[in-house]
C-alpha cells in the first residue's frame, strides 16, 4: 500500500511511495507526530539521479524488517534535496561539521523540534569497511533516545547553538568593496597552484567540471591578456571534451570523473552541469575560435534540448546514472559503455577496429561498473584521445551515427522530469547565447520557451517564484536565492539576444525581491527569503558548489541589471555583495569562481553596448552580432529601435539616435560613452577585453 509520498510531485519522493517505510514528506505534521509519539525523526535526504541513494533504498528502505523497525521507533521523513535545498543545506552543514564530510544519501536523526543529534550518509545493510549496518545505527539511536534522552537533548542543543553562532558578517571587508586588480591576480595565482598541468582541471580525484572558475579565467584573460589564464581554460576544456566524462556519441557531460584523468565518470547527467559547460565552451569559442569548443557547445546544447526538454518547454533536472544492463539489473553506466564485441556486432570487423582505436575501447576495458559480457572482455567508457594523424571525418560520422542508433535500443536511464527554476535560468542563458553565436534560432526559441514556462507556471502575481514544477503544475516549495538570481541572469541573457526588453523587466522584478527578501543591511545575502519557513538556522553560503552560489549569482545579475538601467541601488547592492569575494577569493578561488568572474565584470565596468536600428536591417544584425561576440568581461547588450516600446523598457537605449539614418552602436564604460559607430569591425575592436 502506498505511503504518504504518493501524493507528492517530486520524482525522487515518488520513487519511495511504495516502500514499506511509512514515509512522511518534510512538514510540520511530521514533527508534530514525532512529538505526539515521543520518538525521534529519521531525516533521509537524496535526489532522483543519486546512485547510492538508490542503493540504500533497495537495501534498506525496501526491506520489510528494516521498515518495521523504522516505523515503530521513528517518524521517517524523506526530502528531495533539489526541491528543498534549504533543508539540505542546514543539515548538511551539521553533518560536515560533525563528521568532516558529507554527501548523499544524507541520514540525520532529529528531535521532534528538528534539532539534529546523530549523522551519517550511506549505511550498508550489514557491517562492512568499518561502517556499522543501518540496522545497528537504528538500534543504537533508539537505545540512546530511550535510555539517555537528556544526553541526546544536550548534544542537539550544542549543535544548534554552534550552527546559530556561525556568521559570515565578520568575513566581509569593512567597506564592503569588490576585489581590486591585485586581489584578482592573487586568485589567479591560487588557481595556478591547484592546476593539473598534465590532465587539466584542478586538484585530484574525483574531478568536477570547474565551470565557474573557467569563466573567471576567460574574463581575466580578456581584461588582462593573461596567457596563463587562457591556457588553463583551453587545457581543461580539451581534456574534458576528449575524456569519458563527455558523451562522445550523444553529447553532454556526466556529473564528474571518479579519477584524475577524466576517464571514468559518475554517469548521471545534470541539467545544471550541461548548461554551465555549454556556456563555458561557447565563451571559449568566442575568445579563440576553437573548433573543438564550437562542436562541444553545440552538441551539449542539442543534448539538453533532445534529452531534457519537457512537453511544457522547460528542462528536466537530470538523467540517472543507472539503467537496466539487459538482464533486469540496474547498473551504473550500462547505457553508455561498450565492449569490443558490441562494437563488432554493430559496425562489423573493420569499422569496429577503427572505432575502438578512435574511442579507446580495449579488451581489458576502462570501466569496472558493468561486468564484461561472455567473450566480450571488459567494458570501456568512450573517450576521444588526440589522434596520431588525420581522422576520416566521414567515416567517424558514420560510426557515431550507427553506435548512437544502437545505443538508443538499450534500456534508457530514468529521467527526473521536475523543472527547477534556477537550473532552467542557467539553461536559458546558455541556449540563448549559443544559438546567437552559431546562428541557431531553434536554440534561442528553446530558451524563450523555457522562459515563458517560468513566467506562466513558476511566477505568481507578486513576482515570487516557485522553485519547481512538474507536468506544468507548480510545486508548493518557494524559490530560494539561486532561483531568483539564475532566472534573472537567464532572462538578461535572453533579452540581450532577442532584443525583447520584457525579459529585462521580469529580471528587475526578481532582483527587487532579492533586495527585499534576501539581502541584509550589511550587504550579506541569505539563501532563503525573510518570510520563508523557519529552520534551525537560516542557510547562507557564498561559495560555489555544483552551481554558482546564490550570493554571487545575485551579485552578477544585479550588476548587469544596473548597467542596463542605470540603477544606483542595484549597483551598490552588487558591489556590497562582492565584498565576500574580496574576503575569500585569494584563499579559496576554486570555490568562489563565479564571484571572481562577477568581480572581473565590475572592474571592467561592465561595458554597456546599446545597438539601435530596425531589427530586420542587416546592418543592425551585424552590429548586434559584433556586440554579442565581444569578450569584454560581463558586457551587457541592449537592442532596440529608436522610439520603440523596447527603448522605454531598457533605459540604456534611451536617447540613442541613428547615425546619419544608419543603425549604430553606443559603447559606455565607467559613466563615459564613446562616439557611436556604424562599423561592426570597429565595434568588435572596442569590445576586445
Image: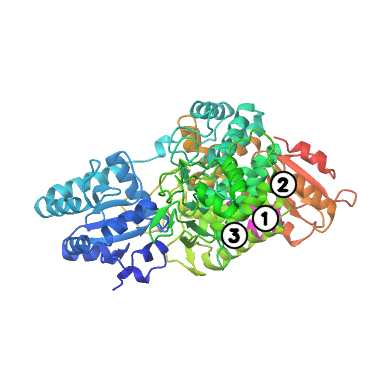
Crowding near pointer 1: few (<14 within 10 Å), some, many (20+)?
many
Picture coordinates of residue 230, whole percent (x, y): 62, 32
Residue located at (61% from left, 38% from top): 602
Q: Secondary structure at mark 1?
A: helix
481 in magenta: no
Residue located at (19% from left, 64% from top): 68
Q: Nearer the viewer, mark 1 or mark 3?
A: 3
Crowding near pointer 2: few (<14 within 10 Å), some, many (20+)?
many
- Mark found first going from the N terminus, 1 or 2: 1
Reply above or below: 305 against 366.
below
Residue closest to the eye, 683 or 321: 321
- Residue, disc 1: 495
Magenta range: 489-508
Picture coordinates of residue 474, whole percent (x, y): 48, 67
Q: Is residue 164 visible?
A: no
- Residue, disc 3: 306
How far is mark 1 from mark 2, CA to CA?
A: 11 Å
Amino acid at each position: 500500500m502506498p505511503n504518504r509520498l504518493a501524493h507528492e510531485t517530486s520524482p525522487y519522493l515518488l520513487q519511495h511511495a511504495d516502500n514499506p517505510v511509512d514515509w512522511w514528506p518534510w512538514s510540520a505534521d511530521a514533527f508534530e507526530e514525532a512529538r505526539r509519539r515521543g520518538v525521534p525523526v529519521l531525516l533521509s535526504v537524496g535526489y532522483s539521479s543519486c546512485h547510492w541513494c538508490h542503493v540504500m533504498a533497495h537495501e534498506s528502505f525496501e526491506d520489510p524488517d528494516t521498515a518495521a523497525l523504522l516505523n515503530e521507533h521513528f517518524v521517517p521523513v524523506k526530502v528531495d534535496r533539489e526541491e528543498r535545498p534549504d533543508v539540505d543545506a542546514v543539515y548538511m552543514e551539521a553533518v560536515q561539521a560533525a563528521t568532516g564530510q558529507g554527501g548523499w544519501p544524507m541520514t540525520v536523526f532529529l528531535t521532534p523540534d528538528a534539532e539534529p543529534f546523530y549523522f551519517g550518509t550511506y549505511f550498508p545493510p550489514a557491517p562492512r569497511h568499518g561502517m556499522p549496518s543501518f540496522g545497528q545505527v537504528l538500534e543504537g539511536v533508539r537505545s540512546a533516545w530511550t535510555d539517555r534522552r537528556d544526553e541526546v537533548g544536550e548534544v542537539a542543543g550544542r549543535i544548534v547553538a554552534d550552527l546559530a553562532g556561525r556568521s559570515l558578517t565578520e568575513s566581509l571587508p569593512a567597506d564592503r568593496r569588490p576585489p581590486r586588480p591585485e586581489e584578482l591576480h592573487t586568485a589567479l595565482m591560487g588557481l595556478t597552484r591547484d592546476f593539473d598541468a598534465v590532465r587539466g582541471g584542478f586538484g585530484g580525484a574525483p574531478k568536477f567540471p570547474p565551470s565557474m572558475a573557467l569563466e573567471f579565467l576567460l574574463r581575466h584573460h580578456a581584461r588582462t591578456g593573461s596567457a596563463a589564464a587562457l591556457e588553463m581554460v583551453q587545457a581543461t576544456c580539451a581534456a574534458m571534451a576528449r575524456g569519458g566524462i563527455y558523451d562522445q556519441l550523444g553529447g553532454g557531460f556526466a556529473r564528474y570523473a571518479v579519477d584524475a584523468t577524466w576517464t571514468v565518470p559518475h554517469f548521471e547527467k545534470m541539467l545544471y552541469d550541461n548548461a554551465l559547460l555549454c556556456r563555458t565552451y561557447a565563451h571559449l569559442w568566442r575568445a579563440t575560435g576553437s573548433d573543438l569548443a564550437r562542436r562541444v557547445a553545440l552538441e551539449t546544447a542539442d543534448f539538453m534540448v533532445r534529452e531534457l526538454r519537457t512537453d511544457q518547454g522547460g528542462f528536466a533536472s537530470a538523467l540517472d546514472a543507472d539503467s537496466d544492463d539487459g538482464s533486469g539489473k540496474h547498473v551504473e553506466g550500462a547505457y553508455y559503455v561498450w565492449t569490443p564485441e558490441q562494437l563488432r556486432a554493430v559496425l562489423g570487423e573493420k569499422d569496429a577496429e577503427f572505432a575502438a582505436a578512435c574511442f579507446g575501447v580495449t579488451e581489458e576495458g576502462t570501466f569496472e561498473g558493468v561486468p564484461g559480457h561472455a567473450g566480450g572482455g571488459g567494458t570501456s567508457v568512450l573517450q576521444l584521445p588526440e589522434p596520431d594523424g588525420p581522422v576520416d571525418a566521414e567515416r567517424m560520422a558514420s560510426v557515431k551515427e550507427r553506435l548512437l542508433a544502437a545505443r538508443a535500443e538499450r534500456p534508457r536511464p530514468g529521467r527526473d522530469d521536475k523543472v527547477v527554476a534556477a537550473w532552467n535560468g542557467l539553461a536559458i542563458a546558455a541556449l540563448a547565447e549559443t544559438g546567437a553565436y552559431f546562428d541557431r534560432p531553434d536554440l534561442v526559441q528553446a530558451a524563450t520557451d523555457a522562459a515563458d514556462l517560468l513566467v506562466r507556471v513558476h511566477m505568481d502575481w507578486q513576482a515570487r517564484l516557485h522553485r519547481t514544477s512538474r507536468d506544468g503544475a507548480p510545486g508548493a516549495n518557494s524559490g530560494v536565492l539561486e532561483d531568483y538570481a539564475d532566472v534573472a541572469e537567464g532572462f538578461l541573457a535572453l533579452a540581450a539576444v532577442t532584443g525583447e526588453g520584457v525579459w529585462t523587466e521580469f529580471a528587475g522584478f526578481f532582483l527587487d525581491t532579492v533586495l527585499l527578501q534576501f539581502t541584509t543591511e550589511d550587504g550579506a545575502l541569505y539563501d532563503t527569503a525573510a518570510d520563508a519557513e523557519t529552520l534551525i538556522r537560516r542557510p547562507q553560503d557564498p561559495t560555489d558548489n555544483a552551481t554558482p552560489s546564490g550570493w554571487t549569482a545575485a551579485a552578477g545579475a544585479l550588476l548587469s541589471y544596473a548597467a542596463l538601467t542605470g540603477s544606483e541601488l542595484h549597483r551598490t547592492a552588487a558591489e556590497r555583495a562582492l565584498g565576500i569575494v574580496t574576503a575569500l577569493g585569494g584563499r579559496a578561488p576554486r570555490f568562489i569562481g563565479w564571484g571572481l568572474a562577477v568581480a572581473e565584470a565590475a572592474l571592467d565596468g561592465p561595458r554597456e553596448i546599446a545597438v539601435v536600428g530596425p531589427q530586420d536591417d542587416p546592418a543592425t544584425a551585424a552590429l548586434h552580432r559584433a556586440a554579442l561576440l565581444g569578450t569584454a568581461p560581463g558586457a551587457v547588450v541592449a537592442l532596440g529601435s529608436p522610439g520603440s516600446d523596447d527603448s522605454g523598457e531598457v533605459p540604456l537605449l534611451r536617447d540613442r539616435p541613428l547615425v546619419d539614418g544608419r543603425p549604430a552602436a553606443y559603447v559606455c564604460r565607467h559613466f563615459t560613452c564613446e562616439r557611436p559607430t556604424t562599423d561592426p569591425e570597429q565595434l568588435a575592436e572596442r569590445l576586445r577585453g
